[in-house]
Image (cartoon, grey):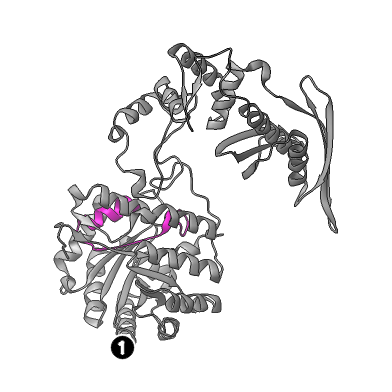
Amino acid sequence: MQNGSGNERVIVFDTTLRDGEQAPGASMTLQQKLQVARVLGHLGVDVIEAGFPVASPGDFEAVQAVARAVEGPTIAALARASRGDIDRAVDALTGARKQRVHVFLATSPIHRQHKLKMSREDVLRLATGSVAYARSRCEDVEFSAEDAARTEPEFLAEVVERVIEAGATTINIPDTVGYAVPAQFAELIAFLRRTVRGIDDIVLSVHCHDDLGLAVANSLAALQAGARQVECTVNGVGERAGNCSLEEVVMALRTRADFLKLETGIRTQQLCNASRVVAAATGFHVARNKAVVGQNAFAHESGIHQHGMIEFPLTYEVMRPEDVGFKSTSLVLGKHSGRHALASRLRDLGYELEPAQIDQVFEELKKLADKKKEIYDGDLEALLVSLFHRSAAASWTLVSLTAASGTGTPPSAAVRLQRRGGRAQEEAATGDGPVDAVFKCIERITGVNAKLRSLQIASVSAGEDAQGEATVDVESDGRRFRGRGVNTDIVVASAEAYLEVVNHIAAGRLPRRSPAVPEMTCGAV
């Protein structure tokens, strides 16, 4: 199907709620599933596979709830090749305006021999009978030949031809275990299109897994060979190494439409939001280096890359961050950054420094970057203060800390801090936990209040006396700061991390313009 652009339309079949949830540890509650389903509808997917109704009462209820709540996409339910499964799927789909029953049966010799204990003839009979029955109960029937990539091509073609005759409207060719490679998989699709009667009357679909890291590549190869539905999941979640990533395949089709001549109906500006919602619902965090939606997807630290991005963004980006939901490109300041990025960031913050001053800041930035992986704006401003207002910089150190928590009593802490050139001060507080209580004590002593965005704890050594590393990410007055502390006691490590941030914030509150340094000016921020 072509539109005004001349490109053919690819149907996006999302199986986050079914195959995605089958990933160990990714189970979602009913409310989480509904939230994800609504996000998928807003994203513009064509088909939502809402679950496997016969698997459990909870799965049935979830499919039923999605079918009633989400309008726009076709709602699909998975079923094995049995009447009981098909009936259960049809019942769960009641309420959906557009319904699809998705029947699957394994076809590969490995599955026939070791799982099904069936002959070729048995598989053919069961596949055609179940599809015919499903079609008698639902107008839209998809059939998946499980493990198609490891099935004999001639037998696969026979199965596909027979289920088309039985009434299937979509035929899915899965690479169930991620075994295929792009050229081979493309040839399998081309072979089916050449040899199967009636194949032009149905939608040919692909469903690829990522066991060898080739799910997106195999899906794109299949689409080039004539498939017109791609089955995928947000963030690539799914069994074992996951599925074809929705955001990656969609943006590949959009970015290389000049070559592939294909497009989708996905509202790509919603991709980042969908990614965050699915990550929160499944508990599977998105890797920083994840393509399209990862935190580093549009971040640049290398000085050479940053210079190129400042001059012309297309030098190092093939997509615009705004097209997938990011606000803008991020030029990250770190040990690989160059002077161009530093000067650009200083101007963005409102500072106009002389070249000699920029050189001075640059040298200190490199030293700081050896200790910190990423330099935030707050860190940079604290560095400016330490360079040009050194005598006025505030500094607090931890003298002592006690914290207590337990059942039946609110968590509490007492903290004693020493200010450079001043006397020690002590405060006590209660909180939601011992760490929260410690943070409140620090805030009361220093007078600095900040919004905690995240607190991460990780072990940096092994054994009973392992050291814990605490990393805090906070926001104050529109600036972000990161602090780090290491101690065998994670509460102490957290206090040290937070105190590092507090010292930076306190330093940044000093006047930006000093009479002793008139050439250091600050514009409106």
- Residue occupying image coordinates x 53% and y 30%: 375
Horizontal and vertical percent position of residue 287: 48, 45
Compared with residue 452, is residue 113 higher up or lower down, i.e. above or below?
below
Q: Quadrant of the N terminus?
A: bottom left
The picture quadrant where one finds residue 320 is top left
Q: Amino acid at mark 1?
A: Ser
Q: Nearer the viewer, residue 239 or 18?
A: 18
Q: Note whether residue 402 is visible.
A: no
Residue furthest out toward the front? 515
Q: Can you give x and y, in whole percent of width and height, for residue 436 in the image?
A: 73, 46
Tell me which residue sits at (42%, 52%) in the image.
272
In the picture of the structure, the residue carrying the numbered disc 1 is 136
Quarter of the figure with residue 58: bottom right
Q: Nearer the viewer, residue 352 or 320?
A: 352
Image height of 447 relative to 389, above or below:
below
Q: Which residues are magenta?
A: 216-241
Q: Image check: 201 left or right of 476?
A: left
Q: Nearer the viewer, residue 449 or 199?
A: 449
3 relative to 247 in the view: left or right: left
Q: Give the SS element for disc 1.
A: helix
Q: Residue at coordinates 47% horizontally, 16% vertically from top-left?
A: 358
Q: Is residue 231 magenta?
A: yes
Image coordinates for residue 17, horizontal then vertical, percent: 46, 66
**How many other residues sit within 10 Å of disc 1, few (<14), some (14-19) or many (≥20)?**
few
